[in-house]
Image: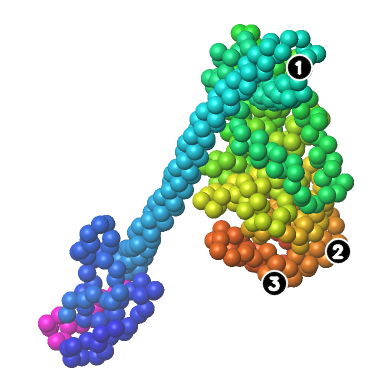
């Protein structure tokens, strides 16, 4: 505090926190006389403000009144509030802008993928038309040779070979998804509208996958592969119902599809919302209890809608916590319809081979990239999409208490990682699986899983999962290293975020 500049005795000094200034030859300036700063900010009082008296021998008759200085505390509180409010607003705006940019980027990537897909389909249609024209030309040549040669018994071996080859082509074209038919009655409508054309790239990929070697191979993966037969049987039933042109059936499909889309898209991380979604599906089943095709249609549409939420820009792609309510919905569907399990496994493994897991092995890096449908141009999107699907599947294994499936997954993945498999996604796959299911495996298998965690930690320290020249893979490897460092310190694993769902939305908002 400043000392008095006039003669006489020295005044008594009191602290600011006692709400008084120096009891001196000074006149306190009231709060109404303090100037307001621009923007609504009050000028902070850092030093005592006084007006010196010009009378040297003025007596100190001033007595402190506590109410006179109550405005100081209020001014300080207002100053603190006003000074922090802009930073809160700036932070909120920044977070909103980040979310907006993420959505825009995902939308652009999705648009590029759709454009590339449309271009590929157009090329496939042109290629199919050329193949069809060549095949028809060959078939007409074979027919003319048969007519010139007389009876069928006099046909040459080359003719029979060409005829059998043509018949095989007929069968292969008719076996595609209704895109092309080679019968004479269908020649005028060889190219159907509506993108049901045969995709030769898909056929080539299917052949490549069928011939490729992969790991792991055990009883659990064989069980998952055995679901394929039941899936194909249900798929025929589903396709028949979808292609039914009856107006009443069309209306039923439309109503059910709308209800399912609304149910899945509004699914929130609350137990109440999950129960409501499951009740909606039960009501649909009860309404069409006598129509088995409707139940199959519901299963396919629900699983497809849930898996679509893992695509770029959608719920589980952007928010990892969204996997848990969706997993509970799948669990309820499996409990209601046992055939749901086969349909679910067959559909999700087509989108993400790591859910089994299925790691193709090959000495050629390009072949591995093709088998795993990886492209360097969209590596970030590829990783996030695959991790979203894997996170959903691990959540399904947890909520259905499939302990055998969890152990088989981790054991098979670790053993396969020592082989010449596709290394790029391994760090992301392992950290995603550990974060989602590691806590529950540790609680169930205890010492056995601790040994597995120790082994994985040593593998990470030695750089077993590390790769070069891929930023996305490096990011996941850093997360994996941090995960095992935390485990070595705490010797325990935390529950995944979002597993403990709140009962109602009010409880959910209370934690935000």
Q: What element carries label 3?
A: helix
Q: How crowded is mark 1: few (under 14 residues within 10 Å), some or many (20 or more)?
A: some
Question: Which residue is found at the position 78% from the left and 67% from the top?
Answer: 455
Mark 2: secondary structure:
helix
Verify whether residue 58 appears in magenta. Answer: yes
Which residue lies at the image location 71% right of the left edge and 48% below the top edge? 354
Alpha carbon distance from label 2 to label 1:
74 Å
In terms of depth relative to the viewer, which is nearer, 338 or 466? 466
> Residue at position x 22%, y 69% from top?
29
Tell me where residue 372 appears, x and y as whole percent.
65, 48
**Residue position for label 2:** 447
Could you tell me residue 64's position as x and y percent?
A: 31, 73
112 falls in the magenta region: no
Task: Tell us which disc is closer to us: 3 or 1.
Answer: 1
- Given contact means CB atoms under 8 Å apart, are the residues at marks 2 and 1 in contact? no
Magenta stretch: give its range.
Answer: 53-64
Given contact means CB atoms under 8 Å apart, are the residues at marks 3 and 1 in contact? no
Q: Main secondary structure of the magenta part?
A: loop
Task: Indicate left or right for 49 with 400 as reference.
Answer: left
Count residues near mark 2 (Cα–Cα under 10 Å), then give few for <14, some for 14-19, many for 20+: few
- The disc, 3 or 2, on the residue closer to the chain's N-terminal end is 2
Residue at point 67%, 16% (across, down): 145
- The x, y position of residue 132, in whole percent, is 59, 23
Looking at marks 3 and 1 on the same chain, the residue that comes earlier in the sequence is marked by 1
Q: Name the residue under label 1.
A: 155
Q: Quadrant of residue 480?
A: bottom right
């Amino acid at each position: 505090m400043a000392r008095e500049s006039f003669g006489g005795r020295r005044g008594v000094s009191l602290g600011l926190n006692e709400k008084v200034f120096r009891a001196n030859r000074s006149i306190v300036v009231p709060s109404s006389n303090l100037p307001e700063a621009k923007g609504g900010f009050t000028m902070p009082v850092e030093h005592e403000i006084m007006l010196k008296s010009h009378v040297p021998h003025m007596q100190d008759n001033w007595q402190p009144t506590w109410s006179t200085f109550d405005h100081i505390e209020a001014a300080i509180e207002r100053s603190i509030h006003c000074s922090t409010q802009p930073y809160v607003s700036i932070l909120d705006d920044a977070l909103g802008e980040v979310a907006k940019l993420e959505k825009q980027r995902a939308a652009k990537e999705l648009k590029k993928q759709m454009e590339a897909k449309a271009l590929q389909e157009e090329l496939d249609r042109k290629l199919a038309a050329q193949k069809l024209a060549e095949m028809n030309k060959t078939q007409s040549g074979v027919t003319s040779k048969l007519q010139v040669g007389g009876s069928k018994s006099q046909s040459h071996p080359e003719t029979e070979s060409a005829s059998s080859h043509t018949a095989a082509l007929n069968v292969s074209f008719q076996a595609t998804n209704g895109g092309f038919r080679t019968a004479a009655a269908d020649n005028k409508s060889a190219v159907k509208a509506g993108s049901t054309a045969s995709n030769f790239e898909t056929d080539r990929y299917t052949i490549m996958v069928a011939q490729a070697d992969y790991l792991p191979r055990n009883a659990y993966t064989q069980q998952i592969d055995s679901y394929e037969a039941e899936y194909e049987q249900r798929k025929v039933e589903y396709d028949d119902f979808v292609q039914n042109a009856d107006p009443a059936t069309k209306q039923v499909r439309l109503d059910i599809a709308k209800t399912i889309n609304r149910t899945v898209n509004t699914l929130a991380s609350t137990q109440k919302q999950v129960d409501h979604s499951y009740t909606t599906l039960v009501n649909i089943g009860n309404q069409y209890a006598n129509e088995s095709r409707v139940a199959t249609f519901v299963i396919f549409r629900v699983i497809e809608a849930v898996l679509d939420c893992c695509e770029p820009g959608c719920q589980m792609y952007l928010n990892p916590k969204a996997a848990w309510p969706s997993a509970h919905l799948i669990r309820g569907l499996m409990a209601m319809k046992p055939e749901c399990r086969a349909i679910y496994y067959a559909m999700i493994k087509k989108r993400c081979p790591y859910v089994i897991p299925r790691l193709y092995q090959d000495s050629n890096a390009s072949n591995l990239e093709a088998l795993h449908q990886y492209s360097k141009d969209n590596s970030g999107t590829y990783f996030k999409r695959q991790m979203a699907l894997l996170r959903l599947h691990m959540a399904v294994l947890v909520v259905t208490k499939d302990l055998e499936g969890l152990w088989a997954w981790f054991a098979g993945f670790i053993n396969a990682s020592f082989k010449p498999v596709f290394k790029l996604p391994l760090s992301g796959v392992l950290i995603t699986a550990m974060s989602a299911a590691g806590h529950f495996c540790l609680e169930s298998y205890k010492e056995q899983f601790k040994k597995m965690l120790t082994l994985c930690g040593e593998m990470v320290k030695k750089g077993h999962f590390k790769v070069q020249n891929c930023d996305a893979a490096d990011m996941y490897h850093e997360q994996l290293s941090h995960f095992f460092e935390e485990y070595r310190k705490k010797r325990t694993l935390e529950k995944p975020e979002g597993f403990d769902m709140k009962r109602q939305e009010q409880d959910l908002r209370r934690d935000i």
